[in-house]
Every structure is written in C-alpha cells, then in structure tokens.
Image (cartoon, rainbow, N blue to C red):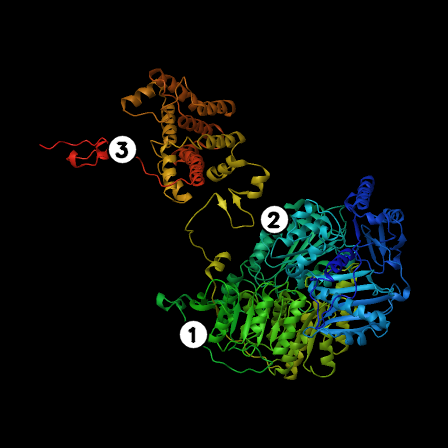
C-alpha cells in the first residue's frame, strides 16, 4: 500500500513546519496573511508489552508523564485537550476526547484509559497513544471543514462553512474544487467564488492564503488525503488578521515517496524543531529527524511475528507480508503472489470459513530459500501454538503460475520449515494442500510429494492443471468444482515430461514441447551468429498496438527479460527480434550477445534514448525497467519522442502516486498508451510480449501463447494474468491479447482503455476482466456495457470479496486494493456488473466454467470458428536452466569443499557465517574450518591463534621483512611488497616447520632414540631442522618457545613428539649452547602432537596435512601480519628509495688498474692485480 495514514501528531508537525516553507503554488505570490500558532504538542506512547505486569506498566507510564512535564512546561500552565492518537474516527462520539482540562485532570484522564481495551463498532483494540495540546476556546460559528483528497483526475478541495462533530455528510454538503493534475492552481477570486461564498468577507483573504499554503504542503510532502475538522478561523481583533487553527486532523501520505519527501517529513519532526532538546539517539537518523512512522489501524497492532516479517520484508527486494487475523483459527495460508493471496482468502470466506481464517499474507518477487524458510517458519510457529483443535488444522500453500520465481527454490525453504515443525504438525493434526505453477514447479511439487511420504502429515499436491483455488473446497468440503481437467502424474520434471512424455495423460489441452535438435546448432563457429536487417516502419490501427512486426527498446540493463522476449519471438516464428536495442545510461554504448534459437545475435546498447530512436525509427514501444526513483524522469524523456514511441510499459513498483498521475496525464495529452506502473506487462500471443510476461517458455507453450486465440483479457495482477493465460487456454481457444495494468492506485491505462481496444478489434471475439477491491474503474466498464459501447460477451470477476469479513482494514497485495467506500468493495462491483448483463460467476472457482460456457456459446453461434492447432514450435533451452532442472550434467571445472557462497548466507565448511560469530569461534576456529574442514577443540583453536601471534614478526633485520621494506621504499603497493617478503620464506628462513615436523616424526615413528637420531643426522652431514638459533641459547632461552611449551604441556592430551624433541635438545645443547629447540621446531612438533592427539583427525589425515604444507602455512599466515605492518610503517614514515651503501659491499673484480680507479672504489676494498 502506498497511501498510509499517519498520526495526528505527525500531521500537525508537518503543517507547523512546512506551511510557510513549502513552495507556494499558483501565480500569486505574496506574504502570508496568517501566522501559525506556536507548536505545542505532547505525545504519549505507552509500552503495551508491560501490560502483563500492571505495576511495571503503571511505573513506566508515570515516568513518561513526569518527563513530559519537564520537556513540555506549557502543560502545567495551559488549559488542555487530550485524545487518543490511533487513527480512530469520530473520537468525540465515543467519548475519547476531553476538553478544557488542566494538566492534573488531563493526566488522570490518560492514566485511566492507557492500556485499556475498548470496542469501536466491530473493532476491539487497546488505547496506547495519546495527543495533548492546548485548548482553543472559540464560538461554533468559527468552525469550518476542509479536506483535500487525490483522485485520478487531480486533487479535490472540499470546503464547508459548518465544521465540527456535527459536520454531517460532507460529500453531499461540501463545496468542491478540482485542481487538475496538469492544471494551474486557481486564482484567489476563483477560490472565493467556488469554496468560500458562505464565509464572511473579512475572513476570505486569510482563508485563501491558508488554502493555497495548505495545498502547497499537500503537494510538496506527497499527501494523498488531508482532512481538518474543525478548522477554526477566529474573528479578527483590532489591527490583526483572523487567526487560523487546525484543531483536529486526519491525513495519509504516500509511503512510496519517501525517497523524495522523507527528508522533509523528518526535519519537521526533528526535536530541535518542536521545542525539544535532541538526545544522543536522535543524532543517529539518516535525515535531520526521525523517519516517519506508519501506525497500524486501530485494533490491528503488529504482533511480534508480524513485525518480524515486516522487518524481513524491508531488507529484501522480494515481498513478504503477514497479517494475523485470528490466532486460534483453523485455516492458515502461505500463498505466493499478491493477487493469488486475495483469491485464496475469497475462496475460504465464500465457503463460510472467514471466522476460521487465521492469517492473510503473501510472499512473492523471487524470495530466496532462506527468506522463504523464515517466512514459513513464522507461520508454522503461530499455527502450532496453543491447544490442539479436535478438528485439526488446514494449511494452504498456494499460488498462481509464477513469472520468474523458481518454485523449487522457494519450496526448499518451506520444506525446511515443515521438517523442523514435523512433530508439532502431527500433534495439531495439520493437513496440507499445495497448488503451484511456474518455473521449475514440477521439481518443487515432486519434492513436496516426497516430503508427504515421510513427514507423517497429509500433503496433497496439485499443479497448474488444477484451478488456482480448487484446493480450497477440496480441503474444506471434500468436493471439486464442476469443470475439471485431468491431473497428470509426472516424473517430477516438467521438460522431461513434455519432451519425452509420461505414463499418464497430462490433459488434452497441454501441448508437448520439442527441443531444438542438435543439427540445428551450427557446427562452424562462424555460423553461430544471426544478423537481421533493419525493420521497416509500419502503420497499425489504434486498437492494435502490438503485431508480429512490433519492435521495442528495453530501458535498463535487463538481459533476462530481453532473452525471454527473444525466445518468445523465435517460438512465434518472427522474422526479426522484437527487441531492437537496450538503453542504459551507464557504461557506454556497446553490444550484448543473446540467443536467437540455438544461434546468437547481437543487440546494441545505447547510453541515450535519442541515439536509439535515430538508429531504429521503426520502434514504437519502450519497456521501461527503470527503478521507482528514476522512472518518472526516464518516462518523461521517452515522452519527448512521442511522435515515434506510442506505447510505454512501466515495470517499476513503488512509483509515487503523484508522479504516476503526472505521467498518465502527460501520456493522454501526447496520445501514448502507458501500461503500468507496477506491472509485469502484457502479451499478444504469436506476436509480442513485454518483458517477463507469461513466465518461462514451458508456460508459454502450455498456455498456447505461441499462437493467437480469440479471448482478450485485462487484469490488475501480473501473477493472476499468468493464471488467466492458463485458465483461458484450458477452457477456450486461447488468448488473443492480455494486459496486466498494474496494481497501483493510478495505472497509466485502465480496464476500459483496453476493453475498448478489444471491442474495436474484429479478431478479438470475447472479453475477460479480472478486477479487484478498491477503485471505481469497473464502473466505467459497466457504463460502457450499459450504453452499448461494449457489445462483445464479457466475463468478469472482482477479487477481494473477503474484505467484508474483516473487522479492521487489511491491505491486500496491491497498493490500490483497498476499498475507500462501499462502492469500491468487490461485492458491490460484482453485483453491479451482473446487473449490467456481464457474465459474473458466483465465485472465482466458477470462473473456468463461466468462460467455457460463454466460449462454447460463441462457437455454437459461429462467432468463433476453432482452428486446427499449429505445429508446436521448437523451444531452445539454456544450458544453465537445463542443468538446474536436472536434464543435463557436466563435470565441474573446479571443486571446493570449504566454502559455499551460493545461498543466502556464506558457509565455512558447512557452518553459517552468523553462527561463526554467535559461537565466537575466533580466528583459530575460522582457520580450523577453512584449513581442516572441521571444528577443532577450543584448546586447538587457541594454539593456532598463539602460533599466529608468535610468528607475526621477528624484527626488520630478517630477510623477509628486509625485502618487504626495500620493496615498499621502491614505491610499490602493499601486495607487491608483501609478496616480495613472502618469497624469501624457504628452508633457510621460516620454512623449517615442515622439515622439523617431518624429521622428528619420522625418527620417533621409526623407533630411533634421540641420540641415535642426532648421530644419524650428523653422519648424513645434515642439520636438524628446528634446532639452533643465532642469538638464543639454553642460558638465554627464547621466551616464544617457553610460551609454546607451557601451553602445550598444560592443554594437550599428550605430547610425545614434543617430548622427543626436547630430549634431542638435551643432546645438541650439550655440544653447543645455542643448539636449542627453536620456535619453528617447537611449533612444528607441537602441531604434530595436535594432529595426532586431538581425536579430530585420522592417522592418514594427520600425515596428509603434514605433507601438503600446512605447518609452513601457519608461518606464512602469521608472518604476513608483520610484513604488512612493515609496509604500512614505511609508508607512514614516507621513507624514500633505498640504496645500499658501497662500503658494505666487497667488489671483487679481476684485472683492473688501481691508478685508473676512482678513490672511492679503492677505499671500497677492490681486489686487483698490479700491472706487470
């Protein structure tokens, strides 16, 4: 939902700050004739989570009220008004308003009501938010009413000179003035004549000024509704203008406009701008004030689970929604798609189970496996709480036919959650009914069927051969609707079934796919590319914007959508691709490679639309994938080429309503057809498809969209348009054209726009309309039917009939799907359409039957003449998709067993990165996962960290550090300097760990005594790796060695190799004092003891890790820390290029005459022979 109500407190703060700051509308610009009163507003929001402990709740409330006295001192001196601030209408009528009270009485009034449950009409809720402000005494005849609300045509200003509680029916009595979307704000004289004719003359000027500034705020801050009642305009005192006060306010703002207006919403509510002292927490906002809060409707406070899903939704590009309606209900839903979620609720309510419907929600937009798991887990947790219902519970995992969501992937997340809740599901006698379609749906359904065999819970699984909501009457009443298609058993893989067939019939109306044969693939690489001649411009009838010659630009880098359009073109046997070029303002002009069947072709990418239009004058369609932030500007740019571009599809969701209205009105003025915003697009079978419309190629084939039919449909929902493709293909000769206008409140084109096109097109024989709750566009269709403009048979249904069952407002899946009046309810629309002679089924489950009966009637009358099915086109399939479906396999080029970055969360050897931090495994633990693919004991991880710390550095004089320093001083970067140091590590420097481990272990395992080992090494003229130090000795021990020995002895289960090495040390130091076990040797033998004694490794694994360089890896990793430190140190000191001094080099050159040498060279100890 885009238009969301805000608290009165926030609305008044927005007006107080912006009334004199917002850009003034209209031609007249003058100084303000009124001065807003000082902002005095106190807000109380009590913590209802403390209600279980009344004493704690009362103490928290007392502290909050005490704080208010300190921060709002006017509370102690002014007469006050107190009222709840929770979107409750007609508060005065329900006694939720106290007037003319001092602070003591107002405080007592609040304390008596805070945390109390009350019932208003059918809705029950807890009072928890209050607004306190100064009382403004005034005569009744100074009260007025003003309201601004937005409609498709513009903004209406309603005004009446009688305001207050008894204002009555304002729609009937108020004076109205429409400000057109593209029109100028009216003059002062017009406002006075239209709205203020019943207002005393001496108040009109100030009211005109107030209305102008109020409307300026309305526009600038993206309000969608603003009502003030009463608006008080006082009688003027001598020398002063009348004072204007807005005493009671209700407002909605467009949440999707936050990227534009969010900073303005925030600054008006910043503490420093409302008379408060900012706290440390206030400084952490992204704008100059707190973000706008959108409270839930009264009686619909967010539960902890709803808040969690809302938070999850805010962190993803997918859509995740959850509303708990009845926590004790028996019927739960987990539905994919905004439109689908509504029809499932409708079906449940239509069967009389609305009181048992536990939740409403949807997941869509290709959520990841992890996101779906979290969503499913939340619902299952809610579902399996409390006492067991003897009748058991039902879970509908439903959805339409997805456009691009991988059904198998989302089902993996649901399966994880179901498996986790296995016992709870059994305990609560849960039965699960599943219906889904879309990309890879067969694999998802196969996995669900397999789960049903092991879960211990009844699971019934259905695919797109079953009507979308057929599982509802089947589960609730054990019956099916009258029109059925055969359900196919399958191998579990859609392409396999459709290419190779299955052992059971899959429905007579479902064609079989064929894959492009191998010999279609060019053997010569030079023949792989396909080139097309430039298309020719053609004129088309106004009612036929899409033909087999239509070409389009795709605005935005959308390779998947473009490839889908080209695949559709290829299947429809088009001679040229429908995509002429892409327009992408970033990255420079270039070409992108795409498939054309089994060959490839190049699609140009331009940085400007101007270039593209000049290059391809035949293109008249633009599919605009720009984001909601940039789509307004990009679409207006497209309008500048309206002489050529006649159709624009706006895909983006979240376009601010004011911007959407500006676009649609400019489109009307320029005679451009706009589909969207918030649409998947549309499709003309056999001719043209917009973006991702129609889903994957298998769905295109199964719904027979590769050839034209006779039925034209229009829908709001993109997901439900796919469902209509499916239903129409199974009950008629197929789709002629289908358009999803988008679920926003102000789509660029409406139902009637497209139905009138279909009516005019002689090739379209029958019309279908799928409307929904909210808006009044269906009534324009009814009017057209009644006056004979639409004569062709029309089958229609409005989804959202369940809305009347809910006691509070529930926002359905689309921004526009909420009724603002009885006229906008789905029931009222269905009834009105039925009365106009439109074919309206009793329920959506009867829609296929209504379609079939109407179609058969037209066939019988000869209006439609069924045609023979054409040959099913060959379908190319990408290798990556075939691999995901399990149709092909190939050996991987690389294998990784330590890290997996493919899912929602990075895995280290199977351990989630969040768990790495939750369990605080440390650097040693991470190393154990990445190097050894397992969690080592804590003492082992600590030992690894100790080794890294001990080997981090040994001063600047050692060869590795010196190389690093010299390279750094030569001006090289960090990586080059680090590598130069690392390359010195070997047998003589730092690389002795592997050698020490190998020699000591081999000697120990072969049974040599320490003395025999030393003797054998001496006889072989070999030094013992790990023995000896230039500086340290037995009398001057290396403290690093001592630290290692002490830790190992204290923590390791056994230390046989270390003990052996220490005995060797006793022998070597008896000969020379510095032949000690050095730090390399001590670490090496200790690590061998760790590998062998920890119990984490087999004997073979321990030997392998010694053999493959693991020990030297510890030194390399540790010493890298020091080398990086030296590099940064030299950079910080700004040390220059190093040149080694001559006097530190012996130049030994033959046969040179000393007399000819530079004296400096002689002093450099040059060894030469004198002349003979």
Residue 103 visible from this viewpoint = yes
Q: In the rendered image, which residue does mark 1 sit on?
A: 532
Nearer the observer: mark 1 or 3; the answer is 3
Q: Relative to 981, does residue 595 appear above or below in the rendering?
A: below
Q: Based on the displayed image, in which of its 4 quarters is residue 124 positioned?
A: bottom right
Which element carries disc 3, helix, strand or loop? loop
Q: Earlier in the sequence, mark 2 or mark 3?
A: 2
Q: In the rendered image, which residue does mark 2 sit on?
A: 416
Image coordinates for residue 272, horizontal then vertical, percent: 72, 51
Q: Horizontal placement of 831 versus 1024: left or right? A: right
Q: Nearer the viewer, residue 752 or 198?
A: 198
Number of other residues with Cα within 10 Å of mark 1, as a class: few under 14, some 14 to 19, many 20 or more: few
* C-alpha gap between disc 2 and disc 3: 71 Å
Q: Based on the displayed image, in which of its 4 quarters is residue 222 positioned?
A: bottom right
Q: Earlier in the sequence, mark 1 or mark 2?
A: 2
Which element carries disc 2, helix, strand or loop? helix
Which element carries disc 1, helix, strand or loop? loop
């Amino acid at each position: 939902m885009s238009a969301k109500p805000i608290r009165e407190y926030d609305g008044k703060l927005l007006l107080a700050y912006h009334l004199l700051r917002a850009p003034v509308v209209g031609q007249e610009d003058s100084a303000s004739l009124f001065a807003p009163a000082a902002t005095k507003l106190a807000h109380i929001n009590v913590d209802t989570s403390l209600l279980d402990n009344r004493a704690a709740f009362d103490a928290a409330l007392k502290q909050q009220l005490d704080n208010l006295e300190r921060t709002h001192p006017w509370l102690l001196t002014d007469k006050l008004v107190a009222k709840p601030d929770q979107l409750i209408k007609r508060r005065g009528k329900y006694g939720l308003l106290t007037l003319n009270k001092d602070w003591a009485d107002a405080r007592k009034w609040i304390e008596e009501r805070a945390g109390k449950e009350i019932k208003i009409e059918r809705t029950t809720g807890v009072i928890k938010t209050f607004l306190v402000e100064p009382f403004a005494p005034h005569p009744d005849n100074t009260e007025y009413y003003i309201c601004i609300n937005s409609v498709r045509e513009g903004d209406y200003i309603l005004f009446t000179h009688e305001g207050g509680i008894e204002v009555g029916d304002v729609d009937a009595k108020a004076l109205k003035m429409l400000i057109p979307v593209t029109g100028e704000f009216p003059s002062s004289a017009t406002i006075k004549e239209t709205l203020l004719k019943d207002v005393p003359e001496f108040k009109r000027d100030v009211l005109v000024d107030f209305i102008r500034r109020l409307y300026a705020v309305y526009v600038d801050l993206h309000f969608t509704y603003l009502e003030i009642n009463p608006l008080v305009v006082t009688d003027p005192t001598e020398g002063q203008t009348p004072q204007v006060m807005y005493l009671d306010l209700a407002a909605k703002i467009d949440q999707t406009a936050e990227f534009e207006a969010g900073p303005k919403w925030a600054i008006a509510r910043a503490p420093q701008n409302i008379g408060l002292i900012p706290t440390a927490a206030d400084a952490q906002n992204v704008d100059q004030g707190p973000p706008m809060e959108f409270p839930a409707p009264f009686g619909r406070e967010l539960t902890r689970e709803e808040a969690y899903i809302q938070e999850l939704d805010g962190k993803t590009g997918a859509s995740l929604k959850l509303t708990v309606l009845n926590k004790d209900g028996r019927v739960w839903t987990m539905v994919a798609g905004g439109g689908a979620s509504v029809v499932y609720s409708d079906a449940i309510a239509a069967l009389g189970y609305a009181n048992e419907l536990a939740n409403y929600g949807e997941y869509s937009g290709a959520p990841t496996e992890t996101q779906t798991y979290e969503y499913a887990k939340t619902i299952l947790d809610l579902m399996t709480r409390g006492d067991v219902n003897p009748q058991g519970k039902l879970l509908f995992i439903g959805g339409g036919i997805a456009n691009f969501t991988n059904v198998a992937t989302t089902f993996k997340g649901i399966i994880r959650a179901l498996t986790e809740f296995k016992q709870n599901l059994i305990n609560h006698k849960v039965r699960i009914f599943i219906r889904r379609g879309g990309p890879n749906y067969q694999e998802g359904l196969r996995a669900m069927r397999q789960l049903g065999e092991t879960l211990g819970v009844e699971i019934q699984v259905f695919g797109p051969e079953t009507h979308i909501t057929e599982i509802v009457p089947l589960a609730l009443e054990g019956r099916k609707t009258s029109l059925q298609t055969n359900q196919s058993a399958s191998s579990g893989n859609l392409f396999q079934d459709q290419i190779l067939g299955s052992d059971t019939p899959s429905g007579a109306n479902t064609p079989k796919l064929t894959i492009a044969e191998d010999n279609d693939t060019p053997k010569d690489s030079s023949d792989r590319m396909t080139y097309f001649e430039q298309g020719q411009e053609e004129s088309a009838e106004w009612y036929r914007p899409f033909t087999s010659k239509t070409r389009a630009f795709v605005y935005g880098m959308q390779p998947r959508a473009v490839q889908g359009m080209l695949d559709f073109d290829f299947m429809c046997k088009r001679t040229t691709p429908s995509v002429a070029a892409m327009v992408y303002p970033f990255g420079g002009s270039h070409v992108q490679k795409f498939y054309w069947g089994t060959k490839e072709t190049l699609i140009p990418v331009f940085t400007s639309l101007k270039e593209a239009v000049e290059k391809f004058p035949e293109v008249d369609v633009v599919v605009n994938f720009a984001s909601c932030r940039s789509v307004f500007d990009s679409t207006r740019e497209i309008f500048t080429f309206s002489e050529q571009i006649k159709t624009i599809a706006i895909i983006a969701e979240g376009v601010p309503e004011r911007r959407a209205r500006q676009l649609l009105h400019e489109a009307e003025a320029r005679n451009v057809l706009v589909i969207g915003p918030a649409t998947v697009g549309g499709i003309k079978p056999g001719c043209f498809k917009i973006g991702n419309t129609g889903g994957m190629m298998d769905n295109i084939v199964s719904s027979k969209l590769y050839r034209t039919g006779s039925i034209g449909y229009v829908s709001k929902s993109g997901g439900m348009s796919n469902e209509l493709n499916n239903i129409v293909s199974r009950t008629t000769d197929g789709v002629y054209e289908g358009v999803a206008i988008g679920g926003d409140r102000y789509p660029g084109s409406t139902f009637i726009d497209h139905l009138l096109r279909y009516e005019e097109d002689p090739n379209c024989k029958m019309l279908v309309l799928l409307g929904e709750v909210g808006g009044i566009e269906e009534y324009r269709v009814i009017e057209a039917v009644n006056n004979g403009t639409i004569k062709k048979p029309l089958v229609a249904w409005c989804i959202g009939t369940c809305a009347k069952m809910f006691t509070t407002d529930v926002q359905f899946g689309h921004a526009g799907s909420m009724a603002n009046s009885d006229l906008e309810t789905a029931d009222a629309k269905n009834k009105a359409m039925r009365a106009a002679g439109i074919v309206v089924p009793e329920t959506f489950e009867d829609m296929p039957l209504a379609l079939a009966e109407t179609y058969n009637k037209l066939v019988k009358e000869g209006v439609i003449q069924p045609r023979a099915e054409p040959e099913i086109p060959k379908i190319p399939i990408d290798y990556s998709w075939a691999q995901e479906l399990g149709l092909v396999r190939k050996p991987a080029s690389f294998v990784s067993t330590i890290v997996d970055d493919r899912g929602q969360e990075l895995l280290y050897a199977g351990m989630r990165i969040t768990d790495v931090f939750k369990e605080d495994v440390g650097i040693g633990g991470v190393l154990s996962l990445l190097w050894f693919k397992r969690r080592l004991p804590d003492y082992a991880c600590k030992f690894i960290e100790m080794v890294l710390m001990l080997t981090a550095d040994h001063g600047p004089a050692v060869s590795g550090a010196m190389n690093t320093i010299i390279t750094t001083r030569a001006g090289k970067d960090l990586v080059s300097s680090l590598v130069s140091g690392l390359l010195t590590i070997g047998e003589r420097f730092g690389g002795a760990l592997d050698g020490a481990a190998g020699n000591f272990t081999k000697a120990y395992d072969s049974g040599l005594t320490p003395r025999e080992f030393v003797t054998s090494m001496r006889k072989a003229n070999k030094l013992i790796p790990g023995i000896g130090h230039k500086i340290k000795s037995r009398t001057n021990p290396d403290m690093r060695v001592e630290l290692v020995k002490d830790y190992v002895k204290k923590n390791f289960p056994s230390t046989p190799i270390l003990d052996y090495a220490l005995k060797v040390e006793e022998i070597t130091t008896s000969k020379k004092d510095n032949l000690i076990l050095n730090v390399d040797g001590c670490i090496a033998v200790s690590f061998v003891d760790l590998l062998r004694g920890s119990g984490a490794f087999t004997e073979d694994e321990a030997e392998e890790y010694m053999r493959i360089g693991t020990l030297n890896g510890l030194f390399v990793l540790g010493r890298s820390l020091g080398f990086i430190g030296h590099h940064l140190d030299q950079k910080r000191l700004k040390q220059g290029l190093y040149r080694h001094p001559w006097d530190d080099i012996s130049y030994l050159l033959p046969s040179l005459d000393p007399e000819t040498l530079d004296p400096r060279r002689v002093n450099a100890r040059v060894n030469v022979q004198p002349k003979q």
